[in-house]
Amino acid sequence: MLKLKRILLIAPTEMTRTPAFDRAQALAIATGALLHIVAFDYVQALALAGVFDHDAMAQAREGYLQVHRHWLEQQARFQQSAGLQVTTEVVWAKSSLAQVLTYVNDFHADLVIKDTHHVPALDRAFHRPLDWRLLRDCPAPLLLVTEASHPKPLKILAAIDLSHLEDLTQGLNDRVLDLASLLALSCGAALHVLNVNNWSVVGGAQRSLPTPCLDDSLRDAVNDAQEEAFDVLAERHDIEKKRRHLLTGIPHKVIELFSRQNAFDMVVLGTTYHPGVDRFIGSTAESVLNHGPCSLMIVKPLPRLG
């Protein structure tokens, strides 16, 4: 059975308590996991000063980091008072993708939590924010927190994708529902499952086509097959019938609207990337991240063996 043992919170460089702190604390208490908080801190001026006076720079850097360590330790003591096992570390490094991924792998995180912020489309065109790069490359489930009005989520939406052959996604839908079910059970949250019926795999090809492109009989057959697969999957994970939702439309827009209208605290979504295969699953996650009304948890397939 899936279990969360080690949660990693990536704290902002600024010494401010953000919504991700509250969500991480609530999930760690609910699941009984260890919470480790890391902050990546790097001041360019101090680094440049070290070129001229290494000893002075080392002393100044240590003094600066000590202030940050003390602040994080204060946050840890606050969370330990709630019965949480929590540790902290401040790393002298830029919060680059490589640094974060190395830390995630070395820590063996079962879940990574981080605050996220809206990034205008024009800015994304010239600079890929760390959040967007983690969507693609973070090996552990990743929770990007927008706000935490309910630190312990009350309503969770698992958005699955039945438009791809299962061997392409390596059981990803089950992974999404496994994690969403664990969180819902641990937190006492209501779990809903959603599939957006707009895409289908035709003739075993490794491509997806929008169902309006198909003739009526083939489209009906595809829709019936997806509905049957949806019910089988929902039954396997004990999702109540009143909490199963089959909708039609553009996936990311439907997910965004449905989660907003129904006041979900968290959307759990699978994502995967394959060279030469359409980017539907990954691009849906990116769109939901930028426009979704609540926190987004991203789940990846298990790595292939061999």
Image (spheres, grey):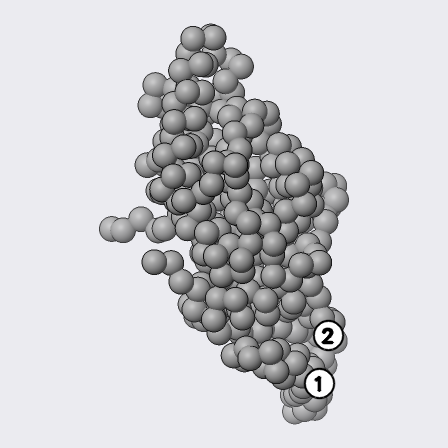
Residue drawn at x 27%, y 51% as measured from the top left = 305
Pointer 2 with pointer 1, Cβ within 8 A: yes
Rounded to the nearest angstrom, the CA distance separating label 2 from label 1 is 9 Å
Q: What amino acid type should be assigned to the residue bearing mark 2?
A: Met
Position of residue 236 measured from the top left corner of the image (x, y, whole percent): 36, 42
94 vs 106, nearest the viewer:
106
Question: What secondary structure is marked by label 2?
Answer: loop
Circle 2 crowding by C-alpha within 10 Å: few under 14, some 14–19, many from 20: few
| Residue 102 in view | no
> 140 left or right of 296?
left
Residue drawn at x 61%, y 54% as measured from the top left = 154
Position of residue 65 measured from the top left corner of the image (x, y, whole percent): 67, 83
Position of residue 250 measured from the top left corner of the image (x, y, whole percent): 60, 27
Residue drawn at x 71%, y 79% as measured from the top left = 46
Position of residue 180 measured from the top left corner of the image (x, y, whole percent): 48, 51
| Residue 210 in view | yes
Residue at which label 2 appears: 15
116 vs 261, nearest the viewer:
261
Up the image or down, 218 lies above or below 2; here it is above
Q: What amino acid type should be assigned to the residue bearing mark 1?
A: Val
Residue at which label 1 appears: 67
> 152 left or right of 162?
right
